Image (tube, rainbow, N blue to C red):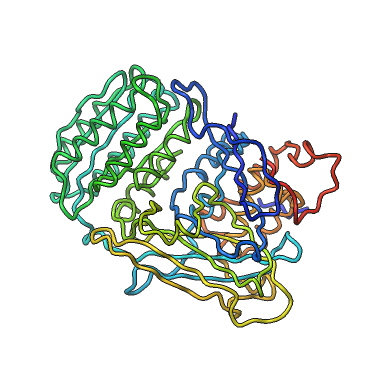
Amino acid sequence: APVRRPGSKRDTAASSTSTDPPTEPLPPSLPPAALTETYFKHYGVNPTIDTEEESVSSFALDVDTASYTLARGALGRDEMPDDGAIRVEEFLNAFDYGYPAPPSADFEIHTEVVPSPHRAGYHVLHVGLRAREIAGKDRAPANLVFVVDVSSSMAEDARLELVQDAMRALVQRLGAQDKLAIVSYGNEADLVLEPTAGDRHVEILAAIDALAPAGSTDVDAGLRLGYALAAKAPIEGGINRVLLYSDGVATAGPTAAEELLAHVADAAAKGITISTIGVGVENYDDVLLEQLADKGNGKYEYVDRFGEAERVLVHNLTGTLQVVARDAKLQVEFDPAVVARYRLLGYENRGLSPDAFSSANTDAGEIGAGHAVTALYELQLRPGVAERFGTVRLRYRLPHTGLLRELDAPLSATAIRTTLGEASPATRVSMVVAAFAEKLRGSYWVRELGWPDIQNLYLGLPADWLRRREVAELGELIDTAARLDRRTARSDRDFTSLQMDFDRMPVLQ
C-alpha cells in the first residue's frame, strides 16, 4: 500500500493499421438542440499499432486544458468525473514541465525515452515542445469582443459572478492600443459595450458590473453579433478575437451546432479567432465549447475557480492572445527495424493521416507565445542497439505571412534511459499525469494498474517537485479518485468469458 501523506456519449477511435478489430458505429458527433444535461463525447482510446503496417503517427497540436480542470472540479465535489470528459492530452498540457524557451527559434523539441513502469516490455517516449516567449510589452494590439452568456443557468453556482471576476482581471492588462466590446446573450443578443479603448477601465468595468442573468440561451445570436463587432474594425496585423464565456448549453435560437461551427470556421479563415471559457457543473456542454475553439482556431479553457481564471486570463494573457504558429501539427516516424509497436496516449480527436500532415491545406492547432505541448507514446523496442530510431517533425504556418515552416528532431539512442530513476522529473511527472488520466477514463491499457500503483508512482517523484503547488494538487486528486472509484473495468464487465492478450486486444469504449 502507498505511504499516505499528512452521463456520457461514447465513440471509439481505431486505426485501420491496428491489430484491434473494428467496433460499433459512431454516434452523432454533436448533441441535439435544447440539451438539458451535462454532455460529453468519448472519442475512444488509441490502439497499439505495428510499425510494419504503419510507421508514422500524426496529429494536430492542442493546448487546451479544460478536461483537467473539469475533472479537478468533479473530484473536488467528491464525484468521479464522467469518463467522456477525460482527454489525456489536456491533462498533460495542464502542467508546466519546465521546458526551456528557445532563445531565437519559434520552437524547441525535447525528447526522452524511459522504461514503462506498468506495461511490461514497453518504453515511454516523452515529446515536449515549447514556443518562443513574447514579452507583454511586445504583444500585438488586441481587438477583443467578450460574448457573455447571461441566461438563467448562469445564476447557478455563481457562474456569472466567476465570469465577471475573470473579465475584470483581464481588463486590467489592456492598454490604450487595445479595444474591447461586450455582447451579452440570453433570450436574444444585446450590445452592452461598443468597441472601447482598452485603457478606459472605469467604463469597461461598469459594463461588466451591469451584467445580470435572465432568460434562455441563444448562443448563436450572441456569437454572430460578437463576430460582427470584431469584423467591424479589425486591427491589421493585430489580434482579433472573440472570447466566449458560457456553460455552453444552447436552449434558444437556431442551435444547429454544424451551422454555428461553420460560421466560426469561416470567421477564423478571415483572421478572427475565438477562445471559449467554460463554467458550471450541471447543464454543461463540453462538446460544443471544445469544438468551437477547435474550429475557431482558439483555445478551450474550463474555469472552476478564480485562481484558474487568473492563471489563464492574466498571467498567461500574452500566450492566450498572441499566436506564434497556426495549423501546427506533429508527426513521429518510427524505424520499424528498431520500434516494433507504438501507441499514442490521447489526441484521439486530433489524429491526422500522413497526407493531411503533409498538406498545406490542413486545418490544425494554434500555439500561443510561450505555450508548451506534451505527447507520450508507448513503444515496444526490438532487441539490439541503434543510434537512431525515428524522427519528430513539427509543421506549422507563421501567423501573419502564412509561410510554412518545418522543424525536425531525431529520435536518438542517447535519449533512452535504462531505468525510471534516470528520467528527468518532467518525464516522470508526465507519466503520472497520463496514468491518472488513463485510469479515470477506464482505459484497458492500464487495467492492470491499480490506484495504489499510481499513488506509489506519484510518491516516487523528486521531493522538490512534490512540493510544487500543481504537483501537490495532483497527488490530492489521485488520492480522492482512489477513494471514490468503485467502477468495474469495462474489460472485466463486457469480456469476462474471454482469455485476452493484454498487448493485443480490442479497444473497449
Q: In which quarter of the image is residue 502?
A: bottom right
Question: Which picture quadrant has residue 229?
Answer: top left
Where residue 371 sits in the image (x, y, percent)? 39, 59
Provide residue 395's location: percent of width, then percent of height: 40, 64
210 or 469: nearer the eye?
Answer: 210
Q: In the image, 182: left or right of 445?
A: left
Residue in the picture at 32% in, 27% down:
220
Q: In this view, does 386 lie to the left or right of 143?
A: right
**280 in relation to 336, above or below:** above
In the picture, the quarter occupied by the C terminus is top right
Coordinates of residue 439 in the picture (x, y in percent)? 67, 47
For image coordinates 20% across by 31% down, the residue present is 206
Q: Which of 232 and 98 is in front in this view?
A: 232
Residue 7 pos. (x, y %): 60, 29
| Number of marks | 0
> Does 1 appear above or below 145?
below
Q: Which residue is drawn at 36% across and 59% down?
A: 360
Against 54, is 112 above or below? below
Q: Quadrant of residue 12?
A: top right
| Viewer-side residue, 294 vs 460 | 294
